[in-house]
Image (spheres, grey):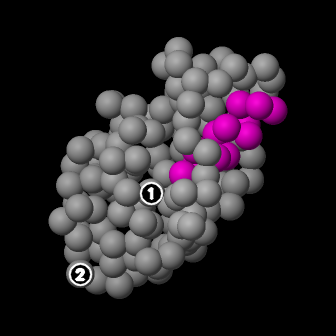
């Protein structure tokens, strides 16, 4: 069983507390990283808001479509990712995920080691939580 198969998918679930929402958001974060590692790009797309703004540590900004096109074409290849979460802050229909994204990737044919502080933003669209924005900052 792959990491992606072990994770719960975003079903319509009644969230009774901030703790329930935090648990769901943690699972969604695990699922989106597993999807990219395993090449399950449709899963990543389903988790993403149509207006996703995905920033990279070099300042490039992608939409969900442009990011996934680069992944599908092999521009971004993720070999290993760790994404420890420091905290999650829920503000109404927005969840802010503060943490890190440390990875071994190939970007444009060049192997890279990434070590970033990161902010992921999730928004509740009424039925589900969608991945809206991502911002990494390199750790010196």
Q: Is residue 106 above or below residue 98?
A: below
Q: CA distance from mark 1 to mark 2?
A: 21 Å
Mark on residue 35? 1
Which quadrant of the structure image shows residue 63? Answer: top left
Seen from the viewer's position, the closer of residues 41 and 124 is 41
In the picture shown, does residue 97 fall above or below 105?
A: above
Q: Which mark is residue 109?
A: 2
Q: Can I make out residue 139 in this image? A: no
Determine whether, in the image, residue 127 is placed left or right of residue 16. Answer: left
> Does residue 77 sit above or below 120 in this rendering?
below
Q: Earlier in the sequence, mark 1 or mark 2?
A: 1
Task: Locate the N terminus and report the quarter of the image it occupies.
Answer: bottom right
Could you classify mark 1 by the number of other residues whose Cα lies within 10 Å: few (under 14), some (14-19), or many (20 or more)? many
Q: Please tell me whether mark 2 sits on a helix, a strand or a loop.
A: loop
Q: Main secondary structure of the magenta part?
A: helix
Q: Is 122 situated left or right of 95 in this image? A: left
For the point 78% across and 27% down, which residue is it?
A: 18
Q: Which mark is residue 82?
A: none
């Amino acid at each position: 069983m792959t990491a992606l198969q072990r994770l719960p998918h975003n079903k319509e679930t009644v969230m009774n507390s901030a703790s329930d929402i935090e648990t769901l958001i943690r699972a969604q974060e695990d699922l989106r990283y597993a999807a990219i590692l395993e090449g399950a790009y449709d899963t990543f797309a389903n988790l993403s808001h149509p207006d996703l703004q995905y920033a990279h540590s070099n300042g490039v900004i992608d939409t969900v479509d442009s990011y996934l096109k680069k992944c599908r074409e092999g521009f971004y290849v993720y070999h290993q990712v760790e994404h420890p979460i420091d905290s999650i802050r829920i503000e109404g229909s927005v969840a802010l995920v503060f943490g890190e994204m440390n990875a071994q990737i190939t970007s444009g044919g060049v192997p890279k080691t990434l070590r970033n502080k990161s902010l992921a933003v999730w928004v509740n669209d009424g039925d589900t939580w969608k991945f809206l924005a991502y911002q990494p900052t390199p750790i010196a």
